[in-house]
Image: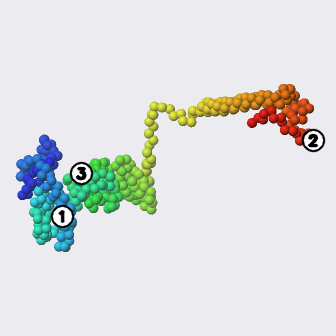
Amino acid sequence: MVSVEGVSGFDVGQVTLTGEVVRLQLKKKGIEEKNPEIKRIMRRATDKDLEIMQQNKARERDALIRSRAIARQLKLDMKMSEVEIQADGRKATFFYIADDRVDFRELIKLYAGEFRVKVEMRQIGARQEAAKVGGIGSCGRELCCSTWLSDFKSVNTTAARYQNLSINQSKLSGQCGRLKCCLNYELDTYLDALQNFPDNAESLQVAKGTASLIKKDIFRNLMWYVLPDSNKQYPLTIERVRKIRQMNMQNVVADDLGPVEVNTGKPKEETETGFVDLVGQISLKTLEKADRKKRHGHKHGSQHGRGDGGSQQGRDGGSQGRDGGQQGNGGRPVARDGAGRDNNNNPGNNKEPKKGGPPSTPPPPGRHRRR
């Protein structure tokens, strides 16, 4: 940041270019190095200079609102766009937009008395206003006029017609309300490509009637025609159009247009991927069999473990029962049949009493029940 000469004071600026690049930019802009309008750098901006500049810049918004109110009171047909106050606060530049010339002599007096500064009025256009305000265009990027574009060229609807664009004011207009500056970017390319197309080929005489030209495709070198009483579009090559045009000049009517086929879809590109697609060709039966065997073996092992434990418990319980029975019978062996009943004549040892007989007596106290 440096302090430069200003109107009755100083202003603060930022150095963006140095060295030989500055001389090239001056040559490109058509500015001489010894131009008296170029301000001299006084010194590096001090902390005090930056503090004063920030204080004065904070006044710009309130000054803009007040200046618009004063202009409405005087009923002037103008729009205040922006106010810039010098870093030292001694000068203010008011940018406005107006269609006609405005007599603002009385307005300058009111501004000077209201803001206590030297007033400068500067008229700008709609594109300059959009450049100062900034914004995002329909392309999704910042406005060209607010980033890099400084030379505003005139744009008309002829540029849109050369590029086969529909004349839609809402789509062709930018944020400033004028035609977009980007319409001129590719205009030279279209003009060079259109030189290969035949002239005076707006209409062709064929057997079905007069075919009218609706558009030119410079990328495919095709010309699109439409026949009367039909909405179908017929693409013709440049050679075919020239041939029909020569026939019409000789008062010969062509039998048909002879359109070509146009593939609107994108062609499929066959690229070598370097690997083979085996989806659906690999069988997973081996993995499935191994998974089933694993699950079956785990289930069989658990059942086997439970069976061994049950048999062991049964054997232990049976031995205990036999021991208890021997003790209850005084050590005598007990003969049992297949149903588990005692074959001896001891009615106390029979679990099932005979029909019609007395109830069975309880077992002797020495016998232990299995819990």
Q: Residue furthest front?
A: 365
Examine the rendered structure and indicate whether residue 82 appears above or below residue 271.
below
Mark 3 or 1, which is nearer the eye? 1
Can residue 50 be seen at all in this image of the molecule? yes
Q: Quadrant of residue 109?
A: bottom left
- Residue 311: image quadrant is top right
Q: Amino acid at mark 1?
A: Ala
Q: Residue at x 78, y 33 (%)?
A: 368
Residue type for callout 3: Thr
Q: CA distance from mark 1 to mark 2?
A: 126 Å
The local secondary structure at tag 3 comes to helix
Mark 2 vs mark 3: in front: 2
Left or right: residue 359 versus residue 290 is right
Quadrant holding the C terminus: top right
84 shown above or below 260: below
Image height of 342 relative to 81, above or below: above
The residue wearing badge 1 is 63
Which residue position is annotated with label 3?
A: 147
Q: Quadrant of residue 272?
A: top left
Q: Which residue does the image show at 45% across and 41% down from the upper left?
A: 268
For disc 2, the marked residue is 357
Give the camera-side residue of 156 and 230: 156
Q: Residues within 10 Å of mark 3 (few under 14, many from 20)?
A: few
Q: Disc 3 vs disc 1: Cβ atoms closer than 8 Å?
A: no
Mark closest to the chain's N terminus, 1 or 2: 1
Q: In the image, 144: left or right of 39?
A: right
Q: Is residue 189 left or right of residue 336?
A: left
Task: Confirm or deny contact between disc 2 and disc 3 (CB under 8 A).
Answer: no
Q: Which mark is first along the chain, 1 or 3?
A: 1
